[in-house]
Image (cartoon, coloured by chain):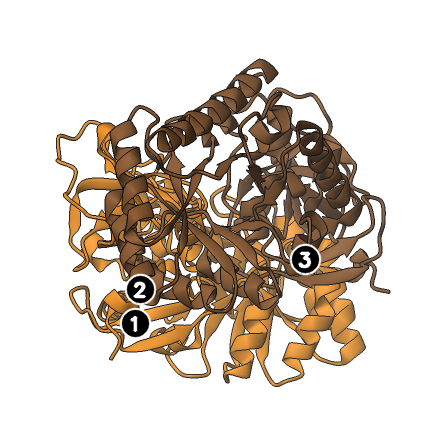
Chain colours: A orange, B brown
Amino acid sequence: MTSIEDLETPSLLLDRGRLTHNAARLRGRLAHLGVPLRPHLKTAKSIDVARLVMDRPTGPAMVSTLKEAEVFAHFGLRDLLYAVGVTPSKLDRVAAIRARGVDLCVIVDNLTAARAVAEKARDTGDRIPVLIEIDSDGHRCGVLPSEAALLVEIGRTLHEGGAELRGITTHAGESYACRSIAELEAMAEQERSAAVSCAEILRASGLPSPVVGVGSTPTAHFARDLSGITEVHAGVFMFFDLVMAGLGVCTIDEIALSVLATVVGHRTQKGALFVDAGWMALSRDRGTAGQAADQGYGLVCDINGKPYRDLVVRAANQEHGELGIRAGSDAPLPDLRIGDLVRILPNHACATGAQHDRYHVVDDASSRFVRDVWPRFGGW
Amino acid sequence: MTSIEDLETPSLLLDRGRLTHNAARLRGRLAHLGVPLRPHLKTAKSIDVARLVMDRPTGPAMVSTLKEAEVFAHFGLRDLLYAVGVTPSKLDRVAAIRARGVDLCVIVDNLTAARAVAEKARDTGDRIPVLIEIDSDGHRCGVLPSEAALLVEIGRTLHEGGAELRGITTHAGESYACRSIAELEAMAEQERSAAVSCAEILRASGLPSPVVGVGSTPTAHFARDLSGITEVHAGVFMFFDLVMAGLGVCTIDEIALSVLATVVGHRTQKGALFVDAGWMALSRDRGTAGQAADQGYGLVCDINGKPYRDLVVRAANQEHGELGIRAGSDAPLPDLRIGDLVRILPNHACATGAQHDRYHVVDDASSRFVRDVWPRFGGW
């Protein structure tokens, strides 16, 4: 069996024990609240990971690109939500995926897209299912809960135009900016109440809304009540990362993803070590920059996954990472030699994962053996 | 012929006219200074681009990963420099590439690596060529010009240990932080003099240094004298990007790379438009954040490549880019509709390119026709 010491570096490691623990943790929470999980597969882009986090081999699941929908359809998924506002130019591809027997649902937040979906539904004789995207927190896209007339007009355009109006969805992306558990709980309630109130607006106008979906990894873990919600969406929960640890959603030792790297140089005069993992392997994500603990481009652990005290990737070039002690800390620079291996925990699992084409799967943090190699894909 | 309007979005566009112009521009400068160019292929990771920027189909060229060396060797390149400090664990792979008839040269900046290379050279009977990396600007790795004894000891370890000591290389990465032409010119001279002085130290100790290499895209364009230098290294010059434009190395209309995206939503109340190019398509690179003109995650152009005044990607999620007018500007938000196409110029060509697996090649900025599709690769 291959040891991680035999891998080329940089390589992406996935701790299967932590992955299954994280999935069970969220699933347990949501079971307690009585709402099913629709995992967002954009984080993993891997059928092997998908099968470990879904209820059934056919889904439900959520995707961020039509490429993901196509790949997961190929592997037998049949219940998919495409979670980026659909455009007229993408409807041929949506129709082709649906023609393969996949219940692919799309989202819209405007009349142009709603009219285009309805027209495509009439043209193909396929009642394409649609959720209306709601902006529950000013984060990004979506109809505002205060725009009741627009919401109803979009709903009516779909419902009477030949599409299947399936309901409401929202994503409280601003939860990433919360600074306390109380704020996270309040954000979860704000997300829930926005979605439910918009579903009520549709129903009061005689329109259907069987689905009321909400979710982000932080709100999914801190919602205390999900009354009126029919499904929860979350992605990064499966791997977790330093941003989630900084938010208090997970602990450092629940992070399932790391980048294995080799020490290639040192400049001890300036307290720096260099590894062969730069932004190409770690991504340019600096999601912890605004948090209490800025982790640079990642937190550095020894080969067994134990973090060195305050050792972070403080700068990144394409194929070089510069390790150093976090500003303000009196921790010593570890005595790492040329050729030594380290593991680097990512700021943002989705971004770091996207820089790699496979996962090297280990049983747990201290395991040296690569049990599996799981491919992951990218592109659109 | 495919029109760019028929492409799936997001897609990466490459303007061949600008690419050949940029390559001719640097080549002309260096010919004037009498020094050959060794282009760094990490920016493009494409044999088609490589062939347009190299002197000959066999090289010389430079790579940042052994995967690049292997792929380009497969396509017939025979003169390659691997520009990240080599580690003992990578020498088997180096030897295998060299055994295919490729003159693959490695770099070291420490005795551990030098001893490992010498040992591998003795074991294989192949005098692996090596450049010693010099730190000319405090940017990253390398022996300091003041560390003459270490420099000579590394040189002697290689030369007397069975490897081929080929000379010196340095990369003035700090040139990216220059703020004026005068600073760029001074940085180029600092880079040159550090490399030449280190080569002289080796020669004064009876050691060879036939190669004296320098380079970064900014210094390559502003060096006024390259006396003593035998080759210049640069990568991003082929595509250019907003960071280079901000530095004054190129103009906006020399940038050859852009991301084609579709408008998917608007929230005009907050002056925002949304496109289907987020950080997955643009990268998380914020290289212009510290420059006079912060371009967000990219500068937005119309379908003909003409920039909208002060319209930038001001926020990026995985598959969403939020467009808005730059802070402090009175420019109007363009009247873009759902489904309209835009082109986004990247902060950093290497990082944005790395998010894609192919180039859609157009003749020039205003061309709508895709003349070629050139694959690009990633990984290690």
Q: Residue A128: x and y, percent?
A: 66, 74
How far separated are the C-alphas under marks 3 and 2?
Answer: 37 Å
Tag 1 or tag 2, which sits nearer the N-term? 2
Q: Residue A295: x and y, percent?
A: 29, 40
Q: Residue B99: x and y, percent?
A: 46, 68
Residue A13's label in the rendered image is 2
* Residue B66 position by quadrant: bottom left
Residue that appears at 59% across and 69% down: A67
Q: Is residue B351 above or below residue B92?
A: above
Q: Residue B183: x and y, percent?
A: 54, 16
In the structure shown, which secondary structural element does the residue marked by tag 3 occupy? Answer: loop
Residue under numbered circle 3: B57
Q: Is residue A221 left or right of residue B330?
A: left
Residue under numbered circle 1: A361
Res. B217 visible in picture = yes
How far separated are the C-alphas under marks 2 and 1?
Answer: 6 Å
In the structure shown, which secondary structural element does the residue marked by tag 1 occupy? Answer: strand
Discs 1, 3: same chain:
no
Q: What is the crowding at mark 3: few (fewer than 14 residues within 10 Å), some, or many (at least 20)?
A: some
